[in-house]
C-alpha cells in the first residue's frame, strides 16, 4: 500500500511538471542577422582581407608609440581591472563545472546532556543507566547529490561559461579602445609639435617684416601707425608659441597617465608628416565584424547567458530529486566510540521536492528571465548595426578628408607664393604693409589648417582600425 502511495505521488509530480512545461514558453534561438554585403563607401570590398586582422605592433610602426601602447596595456588601470574580472569569472566557472558532483561533509560531534532529576528523562537515565547525564559522540560523513533532470545545473554551467567568455571579450574591447586612445593622443602630440614649428617659422618671418618696416619708419617712409600694426602682428604670432608649448606638456602628461605612469617628457624624433600607416585600407565584409569585434561578440555571449538563465528559471519550477547519505560511528560513551562494527551507523534517503506556494514567485522569475533574454537579443542586433555604422563613418571621413587636404594644400601653396609676392611688392612700394600682414596671416592659418586635416585623417584611419576589431591581438 505504501508503495502505491509513493508511485501515485511521483506520478502526480510528473503530471505537474508536464503542466508547467506546457504553461511556459520556450525561447526562440533566432538571433540571425543579415548584415549588408558592403560598407557605405566607394571602396571595393575584399572578403579575404581586413586591416582589423593586423596586429597593433605591425599597424603602428613608430617605436615610441609602440612603447607607449605596450606600457599602457600592462599598467593601465582599466586593463588591470579587466584582468581581475576575468580571474573572478574563471573561478565562478570552475565552481559551476563542479555542479554535478555530490557534496561531501565531515562532521565530528560530541555533547553531554544533564536533564533535571525530576524530569522523565532524568529519572529514566538514573533508572536504566545509573547516571544523571547522557553523552553522545559521533563522527560521520554526509553526502548529498541533486539529479540534474531538467538541466538546471547544466544551465548554470552554460551561463557561467558565457559570463567568463564575456569578461575575456570585455578585456579585448578595453584593449582596442586603449590602443586607439594612445595612438590618437600620440598623433595629437605630433600635430602640436608641428604647429609649434610653423608658429616659430611664422614668428621669424614676422621679425623680418618688422625689421623692414622699422627701417622704413626710421627713414620716414611710413608713419608710426604702420609700425605699430606690424609689431602687433608679430606679437600675435609670438603668442601662439607658449600656447602650443602648454598643450604639448599637457598632452604628454595625458599620455603617461593613460599609460598608467607619472607625467614626464616624451622624447620622439618622428614628425607628423613621416607617420607611416597602411595605405591599403582593406575592410573585408560587414559579416566579419560578428567574429572580430569584441563588443559584438560580448553582446552575442550575453544572449547565450540570458538564454541559459532563462532555462534555469524554468527548471526551478519543476520537481527536484535529491539523494542524501550518512555513515560513521556513534556511541554513548567515549570508550566505545570507535568500537567497530558495533558503533557503525548509516542512512540513505531520497526526496522529491515540488515548489507549490512559491509558484507565483518562480513564474515571475521565469518571465523576467525571458524579458532579459529578449533585451539581450535587441542589444546584440544594435551592436552589429553600430559596428557597421562606425566602419562606414571612418571610411567616409578618410575619403572626404583626403579630398579636403588636396584643396587646402593647393590653397596653402598659393598663399605662400602670395606672401613672397607681397614682400617684393612692398619693398618696391607697390603694396601696402596691410597687404603684407594679410598675406602672412592667411598663409599661417592655411598651414595650421592643413596640419590639422592631416592629423584628422590619421585619427580616422586609427578609428577605422578599431572599428574593424583591430588592436586586441596578443
Image (spheres, helix red, strand yellow):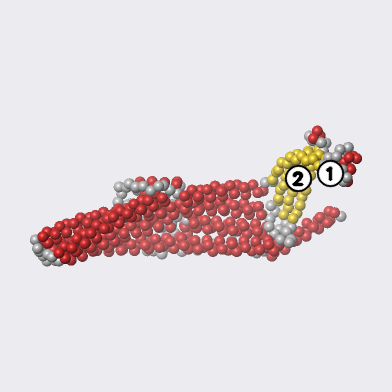
Question: Is 309 on the left or on the right of 37, as rendered?
Answer: right
> In this orientation, does residue 289 appear?
yes
User: Residue 172 appears at what percent x and percent y?
Assistant: 48, 52
| Residue 2 percent location from the top left of the image | 85, 54
Q: Are marks 2 and 1 in contact (CB under 8 Å)?
A: no
Left/right of residue 80 with respect to residue 19 in the rendered view: left
- As drawn, the residue found furthest toward the right would be 127
Crowd tier of the residue under label 2, counting other residues whose Cα lies within 10 Å: few below 14, some 14–19, many 20 or above: some
| CA separation in Å, label 2 and label 1 | 31 Å
Q: Nearer the viewer, residue 383 or 107?
A: 107
Residue 433 seen in the figure: no
Q: Secondary structure at mark 1?
A: loop
Quadrant occupied by the N terminus: bottom right
Residue 74 screen position, x and y as percent:
45, 46
Residue drawn 79% across and 42% down? Answer: 346
Q: Is residue 230 left or right of residue 258?
A: left
Q: Tell me if 321 is positioned left or right of 86 in this view.
A: right
Q: Residue at x 58, y 51 (%)?
A: 161
At 34% from the left and 59% from the top, the residue drawn is 456
Q: Which residue is mark 1?
A: 115
Q: Residue at x 73, y 51 (%)?
A: 322
Q: In the image, residue 243 lies at what x, y percent?
A: 30, 56
**Nearest to viewer (mark 2 / mark 1):** 1
Res. 8 mark: none
* Mark earlier in primary sequence (2, 1): 1
The residue under label 2 is: 325
Examine the image and state in which quarter residue 229 appears.
bottom left
Q: How many marks?
A: 2
Res 7 quadrant in image:
bottom right
Amino acid at each position: 500500500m505504501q508503495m502505491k502511495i509513493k508511485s501515485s505521488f511521483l506520478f502526480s509530480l510528473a503530471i505537474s511538471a508536464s503542466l508547467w512545461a506546457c504553461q511556459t514558453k520556450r525561447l526562440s534561438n533566432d538571433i540571425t542577422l543579415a548584415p549588408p554585403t558592403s560598407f557605405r563607401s566607394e571602396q571595393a570590398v575584399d572578403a579575404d582581407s581586413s586591416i582589423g586582422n593586423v596586429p597593433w605592433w605591425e599597424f603602428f610602426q613608430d617605436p615610441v608609440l609602440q612603447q607607449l601602447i605596450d606600457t599602457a596595456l600592462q599598467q593601465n588601470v582599466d586593463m588591470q581591472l579587466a584582468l581581475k574580472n576575468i580571474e573572478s569569472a574563471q573561478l565562478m566557472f570552475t565552481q559551476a563545472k563542479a555542479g554535478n558532483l555530490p557534496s561531501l561533509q565531515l562532521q565530528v560531534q560530541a555533547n553531554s546532556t544533564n536533564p533535571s532529576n525530576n524530569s522523565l528523562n532524568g529519572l529514566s537515565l538514573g533508572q536504566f543507566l545509573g547516571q544523571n547525564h547522557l553523552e553522545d559522540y559521533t563522527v560521520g560523513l554526509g553526502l548529498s547529490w541533486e539529479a540534474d533532470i531538467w538541466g538546471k545545473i547544466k544551465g548554470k554551467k552554460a551561463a557561467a561559461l558565457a559570463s567568463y567568455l564575456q569578461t575575456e571579450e570585455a578585456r579585448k574591447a578595453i584593449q582596442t579602445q586603449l590602443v586607439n586612445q594612445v595612438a590618437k593622443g600620440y598623433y595629437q602630440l605630433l600635430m602640436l609639435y608641428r604647429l609649434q614649428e610653423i608658429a616659430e617659422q611664422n614668428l621669424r618671418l614676422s621679425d623680418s617684416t618688422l625689421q623692414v618696416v622699422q627701417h622704413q619708419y626710421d627713414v620716414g617712409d611710413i608713419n608710426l601707425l604702420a609700425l605699430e600694426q606690424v609689431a602687433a602682428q608679430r606679437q600675435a604670432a609670438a603668442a601662439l608659441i607658449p600656447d602650443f608649448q602648454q598643450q604639448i606638456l599637457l598632452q604628454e602628461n595625458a599620455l603617461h597617465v593613460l599609460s598608467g605612469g607619472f607625467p614626464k617628457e616624451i622624447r620622439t624624433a618622428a614628425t607628423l608628416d613621416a607617420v607611416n600607416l597602411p595605405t591599403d585600407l582593406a575592410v573585408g565584409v560587414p559579416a566579419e565584424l560578428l567574429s572580430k569585434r569584441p563588443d559584438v561578440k560580448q553582446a552575442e555571449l550575453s544572449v547565450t547567458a540570458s538564454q541559459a538563465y532563462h532555462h534555469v528559471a524554468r527548471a526551478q519550477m519543476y520537481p527536484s530529486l535529491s539523494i542524501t547519505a550518512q555513515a560513521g560511528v556513534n556511541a554513548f560513551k567515549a570508550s566505545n566510540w570507535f568500537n567497530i562494527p558495533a558503533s557503525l551507523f548509516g542512512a540513505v534517503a531520497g526526496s522529491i521536492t515540488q515548489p507549490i506556494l512559491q509558484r507565483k514567485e518562480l513564474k515571475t522569475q521565469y518571465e523576467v528571465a525571458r524579458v532579459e533574454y529578449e533585451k539581450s537579443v535587441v542589444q546584440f542586433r544594435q551592436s552589429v548595426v553600430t559596428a557597421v555604422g562606425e566602419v562606414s563613418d571612418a571610411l567616409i571621413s578618410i575619403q572626404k578628408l583626403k579630398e579636403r587636404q588636396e584643396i587646402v594644400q593647393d590653397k596653402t601653396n598659393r598663399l605662400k607664393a602670395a606672401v613672397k609676392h607681397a614682400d617684393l611688392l612692398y619693398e618696391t612700394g607697390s603694396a601696402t604693409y596691410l597687404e603684407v600682414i594679410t598675406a602672412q596671416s592667411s598663409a599661417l592659418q592655411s598651414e595650421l589648417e592643413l596640419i590639422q586635416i592631416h592629423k584628422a585623417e590619421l585619427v580616422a584611419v586609427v578609428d577605422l582600425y578599431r572599428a574593424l576589431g583591430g588592436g586586441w591581438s596578443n
